[in-house]
Amino acid sequence: MLFVIKVGGNVIDNPVLLQSFLQDLTAIQGPKILIHGGGKIATRIGDQLGIESKYVDGRRITDAATIDVVTMVYGGLVNKQLVAKLQALGCNAIGMTGADANVIPAVKRPVKQIDYGFVGDIDPARLQVGPLKAMLDAGLTPVFAPLTHDGQGQMLNTNADTIASSLAIALSAHYKVRLIYCFEKKGVLRDAQDDDSVINLIDRTVYAQLMEQKALSDGILPKLDNAFAAIESGVKEVLIGHAADVRSNTTATVAGTLIR
Ligand SMILES: Nc1ncnc2c1ncn2[C@@H]1O[C@H](COP(=O)(O)OP(=O)(O)O)[C@@H](O)[C@H]1O
Ligand SMILES: CC(=O)N[C@@H](CCC(=O)OP(=O)(O)O)C(=O)O
């Protein structure tokens, strides 16, 4: 079993939670890949540089100044700090973006009503997973920043949840894959205000009901869309849960929300 594990910006921003998450990750035996976000950190550093973050429907508009900020923050600061912390724990991590070894080629999102700027859309069928297999065979743990490239020298910003599901889909041709989304809630909640209202299982029918009840908003929506894309494209298991539950989520006794 290959574990493809995504950790969000709210966990990365919490030093205590992050450290115990990285310890748990290190303890997971067998091949694993980490994908990290960091949207909140990019916003904070952008503010410090006088580059304001702009969003449409909760999605970042990545103009020329912003792609430089996110390349520095995701590909540099966050990625290298995670790699260094994992190395300190004895996990042989190797930092990656989608440009490295050409693992994730992307196309700049076409401009329709909204110009998202330098945002990359991915086709999982175009991913080059050969170099990743070689890294995993060598005992390395790839750590991906949410960045891709257009093959013509331009870096692109891609949502970390989407990178995780695309990698999971592409690797499912070679491994039995469990995709685990780790964030700061115990799973998908029936009531976003009640941290204990975790829904154990979500299928398309339940998803439609939750949408109708307006129980879902913000960042949980792309997470669920990406989770369904994965489960419908060859990924064996998809889980959404708390970062503190990552170890049990690699066993048979899962905590959080199972997607089916
Ligand atoms: N029903 C729900 N269950 C869980 N989270 C929800 C729900 N509705 C809205 N959310 C929000 O979605 C957020 C998760 O998305 P996001 O912040 O993008 O996570 P990450 O950075 O880990 O990818 C949660 O922090 C929560 O505020
Ligand atoms: C295009 C796009 O949405 N890119 C995201 C990438 C970071 C991310 O996904 O971070 P979290 O997982 O912490 O939310 C952004 O710049 O916000």
Image (cartoon, rainbow, N blue to C red):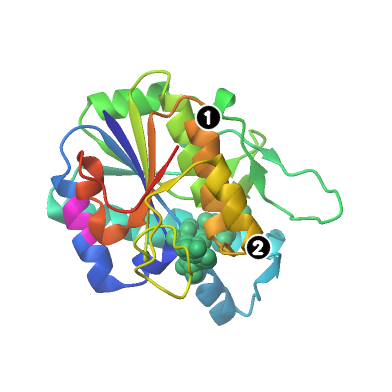
Ligand 2 lies under 8 Å from the Cβ of mark 2: yes
Q: Secondary structure at mark 1?
A: loop
Q: Label 2 neighbourhood size at 10 Å, few (<14), some (14-19), many (20+)?
A: some
Q: Which residue is mark 2?
A: 60
Q: Nearer the viewer, residue 24 or 129?
A: 24
Q: Is residue 24 magenta?
A: yes
Q: Residue at x 24, y 60 (%)?
A: 244
Please give the label number shown on residue 191: none
Count up the numbered dots. Answer: 2
Q: Position of residue 85 (x, y in %)?
A: 23, 58
Q: Is residue 141 visible?
A: yes
Instruction: Judge whether 150 appears above or below 34 on screen.
Output: above
- The image quadrant where one finds the N terminus is top left
Q: Position of residue 210 (x, y in %)?
A: 57, 56
Q: Amino acid at mark 1?
A: Glu
Residue range (magenta): 21-25
Left or right: residue 72 versus residue 179 is: right
Q: Position of residue 44 (x, y in %)?
A: 51, 76
Q: Position of residue 96 (x, y in %)?
A: 41, 43
Q: Label 1 neighbourhood size at 10 Å, few (<14), some (14-19), many (20+)?
A: few
Q: Is residue 99 visible?
A: no
Image quadrant assignment for residue 150: top right
Q: Which residue is mark 1?
A: 232
Ligand 1 lies under 8 Å from the Cβ of mark 1: no
